[in-house]
Amino acid sequence: MDSALWPIGVKRCHISKFLMGLSIAGVVLLWGVVGLILCWVKGLNQTHMNDYYGFALWIWADLAVIALGGGAFFTGLLRYIFGIRELKNIINYAVLIGFICYSSALLILAIDVGQPLRSWFIFWHANVHSMLTEVAFCLSCYFGVLTIEYIPLILENRQLNKVPFAHHLAHNMHHIMAVFAATGAFLSFFHQGSLGGVAGVLFGRPFAYREHILIWPYTFFLFTWSAAAYGPCFTLLITWLTEKISGKQLVKENVKQLLAKISGWMIFTYIIAKIADTVYWALVTAPSKGFTLMDFYSNNPIYGIWILIVEIGVCGVVPAWILVTPRLRANPKTRLIAIILGVIGVCLNRWVMVLQVMAVPVLSFDTWAMYYPSWQEVATTILPVAYGVILILISYRYLPIFPQEVELNPIEPSPSETVEAMNDAAAEDAMVSNGEPATA
Amino acid sequence: MFPFSFEWIWDMGHMVFHGGLWYALSILGIGMTYCIIKTIIDTARDSESDSRP
Amino acid sequence: MKHVDSKAKKYGMVIDLDKCTGCGTCMVACMAENNVPFKKDETDKRLSITWMRVFKLTNGKPYPDNEICYLPRPCQHCEGQHTGHSPCVSVCPATATDYDSETGIVSQIYTRCFGCRYCMGACPYHARYFNWWDPVWPGEMEKYLNPDVSPRMRGVVEKCSFCYHRAQLAMEKAHVEGRKELKEKEYQTACTQACPAGAIVFGDLNNPEHEVHQVAQPDPHHHGRPKNPNAFRLLERLGTNTKVYYLSSREWVRRAGDNYLDSEGSASHE
């Protein structure tokens, strides 16, 4: 029924199955929208946040999706700036995942603020010394970059691409994508870092506070580093999930292994820095404020020392070790375990740097603050997941996200497709003869 | 965000921060403008060559 | 020492914990003065807006050695390690909270706050409160609201302003009378005036003639650290450089004002 919209040379499931998938995600999305409307209409009293927990599930979700979406900027950097050609086979998907993550982050922020209609004040009355200002500017700009990176993909839809303007625009945007990618990497470096800085500058919160290099606390660098390290894990995880659901191999093994290897070495170096930071914080920074390490991990029902061990050991050292070891990296099962642990690890880090910061008492006569989210918070946090699923379903079905799909899953092309493919080839030849490259 | 908003101060912090911001925005703006203009020219050239006998 | 007209003020408070009975009058006076909203159900104190909040401290010892102390906590109006680098002011992305270097008061601009709550996360004293609900006053109580203080809308952060509207009124009066300086008693906060035990004193910490200066004896070479051995500030070690000083003759109370490692002596308040 809609096969004319599919990329050339690929097979997609029946439209009814596709619509069924959309409907299931749509129901979840609707649930989230109900929570969202309640929060906007009735206010943030719909949440379980309170004056001790001003930052809670949403801010964690924000930080987590931005870290996970870090695969986009880092893969883009590797592909366009460092010129690693193999990654062109996964960059489209990394961009799509990044686009979903960043648009979700902006949506969550729009729900999270008490006066959403005043959100523009952060730009207009910007306090340039606030890490959150840096986050807002860089995040919005980088979302612009991701949109610019996603537009050519949309324009490459089989039918849209027949429109000469769309065809040329996609081509021209690809042509200077390195410039956009470099700008994106610059912006990402700062907003990933400033998200880390959000916690690291809190000198009133010894659990979060870290020493500085110039104006940036150590968490600034650790957040950028961890997003670059763990972001590709998420790209690989979603790719694996997509392959399982579609029942097809979409990306060649060597590409996955290459990205896993890069991610592994990044995690390896990150975790060394994280351990060094933790040791310095535990032995120097916190004691200088009158706290021992165990003050932060005792006398409460949840936040035991286990969380530090899981974050650094189980979800840091273990995935790093698996992914830097060629034999383990080559094994799809151990590689999958590593990337799942990596994704959990970075999410746990963001959880700790948001929710545990709020939980730890600072006044000696105060007590631990515990929190659990309301259904409205959960629904609005799951909303972006449903939105992401929908966008992936649509993009996968109609856009040429995976360049290797045709080669990995050969099918007999229909006569109309053969004609279209020949026309496309002729058009590309004409471009080459005009002195332009066939592909960017 | 702009020098005419009343809390703007001509100090190093504002100049570095907003300098970086406007630099990035300019690159994105100029890049997209270039793409669109070039696309219009390419499309026009295509339609010219199509209309040629 | 002659007080110079142009010298910036540093308004601050000294609270004598030996005198405080924990009656809560300061809290009530503060709420009435500043139009602080309340709800029908105030059982969850982490949702209650209390610009001034009285904490109950205990030395944790069993009877008969058990002792308690009440500690009123307004906004501490931190100055930080350099002027205006308060935990909250430095993080507010929209410049909705500001440090006035003329008075040392940390302000909150309600109409500019967009409710991100970063300042609340930054404040170790939990002195900042979010309006989770729209303010609703029962019956005809709206008629009793203070016309000098604007009520706050849902979705913004609010906090103790050291009754800044009173400073504005006093300055207007002084201006009309051709004066540039305020007298000590001309500008006093509502809690100071309401305290039946006289436990709170308020004034200019920079002015040696003011009682707050004489009692706290702030050391200008150490970011205002008190020279009075019985005086202390909350969480001094964090470098917040607050303008609210506390007095207590009891060692365990003074130690409760900050955090200490075991190696730094036993924390008697635990």
Image: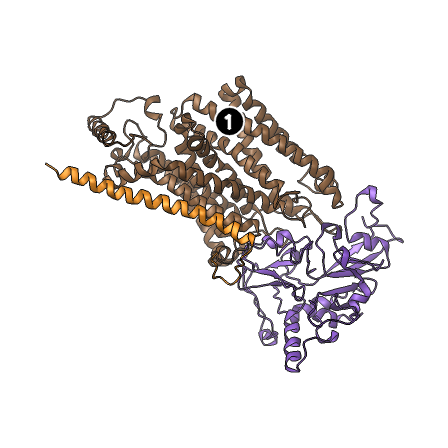
Give the image location of residue C48, x and y in percent: 64, 60
Q: In the orientation shown, which residue stands out farthest toward the right?
A: C64
Label count reads 1
Q: In the orientation shown, which residue stands out farthest toward the top?
A: A327
Chain C's shade in the image?
A: purple
Q: How is the image coloured?
A: by chain
Can you tell which quarter of the image residue C210 is in?
Answer: bottom right
- Left or right: C230 with respect to A132? right
**Nearer-the-camera pick, A409 or A231:** A231
- Left or right: A215 with respect to A412? right
Q: What residue is drawn where x is 31% and y is 38%?
A: A172
Mark 1 highlights which residue? Answer: A262
- Position of A273 relative to A370 (above/below): above
Amino acid type, callout 1? Ile
Give the image location of residue A244, x and y in percent: 42, 27
Which of the chains bears the disc numbered 1? A
**Nearer-the-camera pick, A47 or C194:** C194
Q: What residue is drawn where x is 36% and y is 29%?
A: A402
Chain A's shade in the image?
A: brown
Q: Residues within 10 Å of mark 1 (few under 14, many from 20)?
A: many
The N terminus of chain C, quarter of image: bottom right
Chain B's shade in the image?
A: orange
- Position of C191 relative to B34 (above/below): below
- Position of A342 relative to C5 (above/below): above
Q: What residue is drawn where x is 54% and y is 42%?
A: A63
**Residue A31, can we see it?**
no
Give the image location of residue A126, x and y in percent: 52, 55
- Left or right: A268 with respect to A256? right
- Position of A353 relative to C246 (above/below): above
